[in-house]
Image (tube, grey):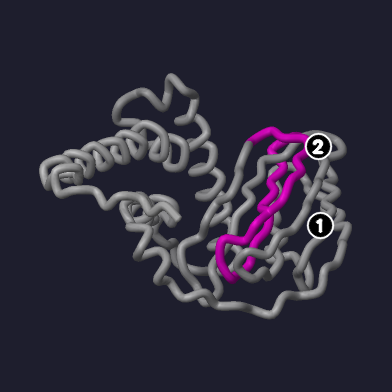
Amino acid sequence: MYNSDIPTRAELPSTTQLLKSTAIALVAAAVILVTIVLPAEYAIDPTGVGRLLKLTEMGEIKTQLAAEAEADRIKDQGQQPATDKRSGSFGTVLAQLFISPAAASERPVVMAQAAASRTDETVITLKPTEGTEYKMELSKGAQVQFAWSVEGGTVNYDLHGTPKGGGKEQSYKAARGVASDKGVLTAGFDGTHGWFFRNRGSAPVTVKLTTTGAYKEIKKVM
């Protein structure tokens, strides 16, 4: 059996080379953060590249819908306004970009008992300017196939999740003036996940939502 030769000290990268590679990786991560992540997620575009790539508009939609959903929840629950959850998670984005693979592998994995798979068809009627939210309780990693369509117009929506026990809300997908959508929702954490719909049209609309996956129930939150 042939064993690979052990590299000599001269063949190994020097400390200078390692530092140079690390610096290049950090610069690349910073460029991605400033030109792609911030415009697409938070509508922050200091370089103008995000606007050229049409990423800033996506971030503006997400931020507006998240703020709109939060304002409605505060109004309905009689709570005091909270700080902007999306901008507040900026530190989390930085941490995720620079966290080492070794540190990530040390995170404990909590296995939760999965709920039995089920299918629901939910019919939602919205008057002009009316908004509502429907959510499911999911374990981290659980998947739900979904499809919804609007009769009588279009809606603004925000597909998002809220961690169990409280924490920063995460928006998975958001858009304005949409007549339908479908896909697979994968829970990024234990908590409640679902949709906020709002009818910005001048006539009532009906949203027909079908969900299939490992969750206990889908219910109206607001």
The quadrant in which residue 144 appears is: bottom right
* Secondary element type, mark 2: loop
Residue at image point 69% right, 44% down: 129
> Is 87 in front, or is 118?
118
At which x and y percent is residue 55? 48, 30
**Amino acid type, mark 2:** Ala
Residue at image point 32% right, 40% down: 29
The residue beneath circle 2 is: 203
Lateral position of residue 158 relative to residue 56, left or right: right
Instruction: Give the Cα distance between marks 1 and 2.
Output: 26 Å
The residue beneath circle 1 is: 211
The range drawn in magenta is 176-203
Quarter in which the N terminus is drawn = bottom left
Task: Sort mark 1 into few (<14), some (14-19) or many (20+) by Cα contacts within 10 Å.
Answer: many
Lateral position of residue 109 relative to residue 32, left or right: right
At which x and y percent is residue 222? 68, 63
Residue at image point 12% right, 47% down: 15
Query: Farthest residue toward the front?
Result: 1
